[in-house]
Structures are given as structure tokens and as C-alpha cells.
Image (cartoon, grey):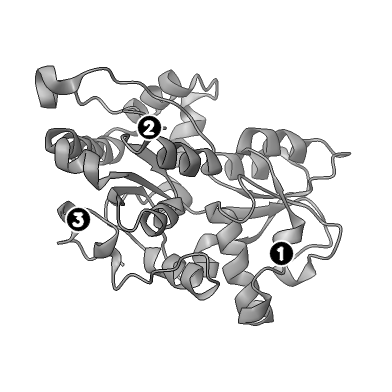
Amino acid sequence: MRSTAVLDVREAIGADAGHVETVALGDEGHLTFCQAVLEDLLATGAGQLLLWDRTRGGVKGICASTAAHLNLISREPRIKSLSDFKEGDKIAVPTVKTSTQAMLLQMAAAKLFGPDKYNQFDSLTTQLGHPDAYVAMKNPTHEIRSHFAAPPFHYYEMSDVPGAHVVTNSVAIIGGQSTQGQFFTTTKFADANPKWIASVFAAAEEAKAIIAADPEKSVEAYREINNDKTETATLVDLIKTPAMSDWSLLPQGTMKFAEHLNRIGTMKTMPTSFKDYYLPMVHGMAGN
């Protein structure tokens, strides 16, 4: 299993666990890797919808993992709202056009300028991973002055970057909560490895419960995995903020991404509900 999250599934599936390997990939890396290998479990954002479409239903979600808020941060005093961005401004996103942040900018542009102007901000986006974008934001001479950040980097930037302020966020654009992390796999892998899939779901449920009951323990696990040197107290404060407090397993806001991607022609098949691109274990949830 390759995933950006580390799940302890060995006890649940016993000797069938096999070799577990974790690999961190960027958004485009997830899409390319899963299309090429088609035998793994992955964790990422809205890109799963594109794989469901491109594989004609061969890739589906297992469950969501978080509805953390994504915040568009700017240190440019002139930029107070999305309409203030102009030619020459640069917005750091994990991947141009296909990352969740890039899609959110397209959805926002369609609302601001009309459906046919959905790509108004595309030319302003620059591909940069969150850690590198954070470093750029702290450098007063760097050309990157805005970053569509995911936690914990929005927190760091608001604390460490002079003049940093929130321009908008995923909740404002979507009109509510939206899944920003999810586990997904191929239907071929799910059919052949039902114990793996059940164990991933159980581990996600357990992780959600641990975060709610013992934030300190959760933070220590995160620090061990990611080698984050941030003080425990700071990280505990972070996961208690509204931007990081929703660890729901049910899909939220995913159909709005589907509608957008279908409308602009990126996604050829329009699903009837989230149940089309998620495995049955979440079908009983009030997802959307």
C-alpha cells in the first residue's frame, strides 16, 4: 500500500498484510502514479474524481478523511479580495489546473466573471509545494506573494509572514464544508482485497476518534511520521481550530467539484451522486 497517510492495518488483516510502503506524492503525482500502477491505496484531494472518470469507474473512494479548510493567503496589501488579482500576480498552488486549490480558483472565477471565464485565474497560478510556498511567502523579495494554502501552512503563514491575510477560503467558494482528503483505490484492488479496504476504513474511524479524544497523542504521531519540529502545544492548538476540526469520513461538497469539472469538459461523465465514485461502505452516510 502506498499512501500519504500511514495506517496500521497489519493487526486487522494478519498475515495477509504483506509489505506496506508509504510514498509522498504531489497532486499530479497521485494521478499519474495511480493511472500507471492501478493497484494501490492513495490519499489525496479532489483528483480522485478525475481518475474515476478517466478509468470509467475503475477508481473509487474508500472514505473521506478531512474537510480541513483551504485558505488563500496573500501578503500583498493591494489584494483584499479575488477581484483584486491582476496580470502579473502569482498564486502558489500544489499543481496548476488539477489540484483542489486550482479547481477552487476556477469555481470562484466562474462565479465572479461568468461560467465561460472559469479559467480567469489559471494564468496566475504557479506550481509550488506547500513547504516551498511557505518559504517563498516568508521571503519579502520573492515573486510569490499569495499562496492557496492547506493546513498547517496557512497557520504558519498567518503567524510568520508580515502582512499575511486571508483573501478567501474553500468554505466561502463552495458554500460549505468540502472534503479535502480521502482514501481511494481501484475497484480491482478493492474486489481482490476486501480485508485491506475494511481495515483502512476501520483505521480511519479509529484515527478520527483518537484525534477527538487525545489531540496530544495525535500530534505526537504526526510529528513522528513527518519529522515536524513544531512544538506540540502549537500543533495541538492548530488541530483545534475550525479550519482543522472536521475529520468526517463522509464525503462533503464533492458533487460541486464534479459539476464544475463536467461543465468545463474536464470530466466527461457526470455522476448522479457521490455513491457513483465511492465504495459501498460510505453509501449509508449523508454525503454529497
Q: Image point 31% across, 37% down: which residue? A: 211
Gap between marks 2 and 1 measured at Cα = 30 Å
Residue 282, label in figure: 3
Disc 3 or 2, which lies upstream in sequence?
2
Q: Secondary structure at mark 1?
A: loop
Give whichever of 158, 269 is nearer the camera: 269
With 107 as the anchor, is 203 left or right in this view?
Answer: left
Gap between marks 1 and 3 measured at Cα = 34 Å
Q: Image point 78% across, 65% down: which residue? A: 85
Q: Secondary structure at mark 2?
A: loop
Q: Which residue is mark 1?
A: 121
Q: State the quadrant of the N terminus.
A: top left
On screen, residue 286 above or below 5: below
x then y, percent, for residue 86: 83, 65
Q: Which residue is mark 2?
A: 3
Displayed quadrant of residue 42: top left
Give whichever of 253, 240 is nearer the camera: 253
Give whichever of 230, 256 is nearer the camera: 256
The three-letter code of the residue at mark 1 reads: Phe
The three-letter code of the residue at mark 3 reads: Val
Gap between marks 3 and 2 measured at Cα = 20 Å
x then y, percent, for residue 185: 30, 43
On screen, residue 136 above or below 260: above
Displayed quadrant of residue 273: bottom left
The three-letter code of the residue at mark 2 reads: Ser
x then y, percent, for residue 166: 66, 57
Q: State the quadrant of the C terminus.
A: bottom left
Q: Image point 42% across, 67% down: which residue? A: 258
